[in-house]
Amino acid sequence: MIKLFIELFFITFVKIEPSFVWDGTSYTVIEHSKKNEQIISRKNKSTKSPIFGANIRINSDTTSDQISPFITSTSEGNIYVVWSDREAEVKSNNNVRFSKSANKGLNWSSPNPLISDSSRGTITAPSIKMGGDNVLYTAWNSGMCFDKSNDYGETWGIDICPNDTLFTISSHLNCSFVTVGDTIYMAFLRAPEPPPDFKVYFVKSEDGGITWTGAKRISAFPPGSACTSMSLGIDAMNNLYIIWRDAYDIGFSKSTDKGDTWTNPVYNIPDTYGDCVSPPCLYVGKDGTLSVVWSYYQDATHKGTCFAKSNDTGATWTHPNILLDTIVATSQFIDGNNNNLYITYSDAANIYFTMSTDTGSTWSPKEIVNDTDVNDRNYPILDADEDGNIYIVWGDKRKGIWDIYFSAGQVAGIEVEDAIIPPYTTSIAPNPFTIKTNIQYQVKNYGKVTLDIYDIKGCRVKELVNETKQAGRHKIYWDGYADLGKEIPAGIYFLKLTTASHSIASKLIKLR
């Protein structure tokens, strides 16, 4: 023991970037140092809210308003943001712009336009999501257009507007979509009758956006009602859930067959105690728990931003709802991981953040994310990775014109233990799996990495990774399909990680 202490005391360590892990009750802040072939890891635990850093403007200098951002990220610290650029001369002629960061938001690429087509009118509410290997998907509401990048946003394809060929569109509002590999599930608002009679519709593509199904109508309120927003989510079994604001109620429906059929809409779910006055937002946890945040107004005394959840796929909801704030938010967004939930919201003056460490039963005091007191802020969106990094983007008018701003949150902790982490590791969850599984792997050095799936006979069935990777942790999703595009049968398989100097294997099981 004394010898080990002396050896560790006199070693010069090389500091590595810290990482963050959530264990269901608190964050673990891991401060890494390298010693030969080992990574010495010092862990710290905390239940405190993240401390947000300086606000960073993403867009370049411009004379036009930048609005409606959306964000997604990877566990390696790559962040991708899209937003709408409203041209100064013609407010209805917009660009969808894209920017990315490879270092957790410290630096951003020059914003690139993805579309500029005045014939489609106003372009707002773009969204962006991760697909399979190296794939990004984005969609926006001008004729319900869609675009795809196969190289993490370096280049983009030709804009696809699937509904142009599906039916005649008189008008559209915002969209919401989720992805599972090459399958894209998309909900949007369409007005089959003259506005404001918008209804919620659904389409999907199972080939990465090349072909699309016909549109299915989900909402069914009488003519004259106006759906003004919706939020779509998916669980680990590919069950789909959607909520929307219909007039002043919250509508809900779900599908257990990948969107082919939907349940009859249920309204006033959860019980709002008053009019729903802002777009409700849905988050679906890995265990299938549904969480919803929205704002309501009954009178000057009964109002605020609320949270509710369902543990039975939407059959029942928590009652009474949890009042997060007496502020009536103009917009709000919810995300999470494990038992942790994060909410960001705005009252048009500030961007707020709160978090729950017990699946929504209690919430931390709200924190102001913006670092100036100038008013006019809206539409905050957040993304949280499994390591506890929290990224928020929003619209901000501190310079007299609408810009897109960003801030990153991390957590502070108290030292509790040290550990030694192998430099080459793999983890698979869930395992066994039925439909999909997430694979995380860690490599010590920059260089060529291959990650393959083999059957019990030693035949390779799927190549997951074959490229140069940075040192550190990486994550990839596998949908259970082989290289030839067929779903693999149930059985025992092996995941093999190979680098120039190391090769390790892990067992995984595919269930029916």
Image (cartoon, rainbow, N blue to C red):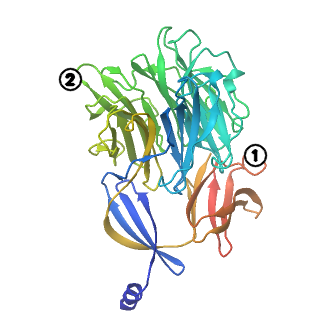
Tell me if 8 is positioned left or right of 374 in this view. Answer: right
Find residue 318 and report its horizontal and vertical position in percent.
34, 32
Does dot 2 land on a helix, a strand or a loop?
loop
- Which residue lies under the disc numbered 1? 486
- Specify the amino acid type for callout 1: Lys
Farthest residue in the bottom direction?
3
Find residue 466 and report its horizontal and vertical position in percent.
71, 60
- Specify the amino acid type for callout 2: Thr
In terms of sequence position, does the residue under pointer 2 or pointer 1 come before the other?
A: 2
Of badges 2 and 1, the one in the foreground is 2
- Which residue lies under the disc numbered 2? 301
Tell me if 373 is positioned left or right of 186 in this view. Answer: left
Tell me if 82 is positioned left or right of 496 in this view. Answer: left
Tell me if 398 is positioned left or right of 220 in this view. Answer: left
- Kindly indicate whether the residue at mark 1 contacts the one at mark 2 (C-beta within 8 angstroms): no
Residue in the foreground of this view, choosing between 421 and 286: 421
Find residue 307 and report its horizontal and vertical position in percent.
34, 34
Give above or below for 98 relative to 67. Answer: below
Q: Distance between the residues labelled 2 and 1?
A: 58 Å
